[in-house]
Amino acid sequence: MFYTIDILGTIAFTISGVLMAMNKKMDLFGILIIGFVTAVGGGTLRDMLIGNTPVGWMQDITYTYVIIASAVFAIVLRKQINYLRTSLFLFDTIGIGLYTVVGIEKGLNAELHPIICIALGTMTASFGGVIRDILCNEIPVIFRKEIYATPCILGGVIYFLLIQFPIQENLVFVIAGVTVIITRLLAVKFKIALPTVYTESQGL
């Protein structure tokens, strides 16, 4: 179940990156690179922090095959994937939900504190998108008003609450991941956002 979630997250984030790259009118190489770094960026940083090297995708060639296949799928069916912005948001949201759970599980396997596990889950879910946005010359979503990391933290809290009860582990994975996805969807639908803090510049 854990491996399946990881693969599904890879697919979702690859398509998210490909959609962003196509929206920016990049060439095929650029599209593939953006899809790749979106899929593995957060996981790579996580594995490096916990000392799991070579990082996960380097140890299992399946991830590379999945990324390439997902990129080709998105490119070939680009005309069928209508409303690029909506599609990008949907796949990005699915990706953060799945990758949050993956990051938490990696932290648990490394015997880290629950708070650190939640931070790893949030990092795994968020930083592939951060790299994608930076390379595409966009302000990363996580740094804007739109709620992005908060659903990941909430999903992590739900995960650790649920494992205190006699609930099947696979079901805990699903509930925590769905919590992240639903929270972000509701936040965007009802325009719930964190407050911004800024200073007004004064002319000389």
Image (tube, grey):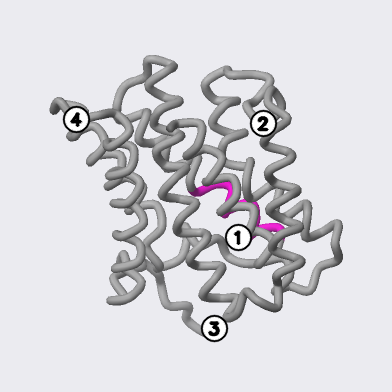
Q: Nearer the viewer, mark 2 or mark 4?
A: 4
Q: Main secondary structure of the magenta part?
A: helix
Q: CA distance from mark 1 to mark 4?
A: 32 Å
Image point (58%, 65%), residue name = 139
Task: Report which quarter residue 194 is drawn in.
Answer: bottom left
Dot 1 or dot 4, earlier in sequence? 1
Q: Secondary structure at mark 3?
A: loop
Does 155 sit left or right of 47 as displayed? left
Dot 4 or dot 3, earlier in sequence? 4
- Using the image, tell me which numbered label, if any, was put on residue 196: none
Give residue 201's position: percent from left, percent from top: 47, 78
Image point (86%, 57%), residue name = 29
- Using the image, tell me which numbered label, if any, was put on residue 57: 2
Q: Amino acid at mark 3?
A: Leu
Q: Secondary structure at mark 1?
A: helix
Give residue 128's position: percent from left, percent from top: 59, 48
Disc 4: which residue = 167
Q: Secondary structure at mark 2?
A: helix
Nearer to us in this view, 145 or 56? 56
Q: Amino acid at mark 2?
A: Trp
Does 59 sit left or right of 51 as displayed? right
Q: CA distance from mark 2 to mark 4?
A: 30 Å
Give residue 202's position: percent from left, percent from top: 47, 81
Q: Are marks 2 and 4 in contact (CB under 8 Å)?
A: no
Find the magenta span and give its range. 126-135
Disc 1: which residue = 16
Q: Amino acid at mark 4?
A: Ile
**Outermost residue, left direction?**
165
Task: Report which quarter residue 73 is drawn in.
Answer: bottom right
Disc 3: which residue = 204
Q: CA distance from mark 1 to mark 3?
A: 44 Å
Image point (35%, 35%), residue name = 118
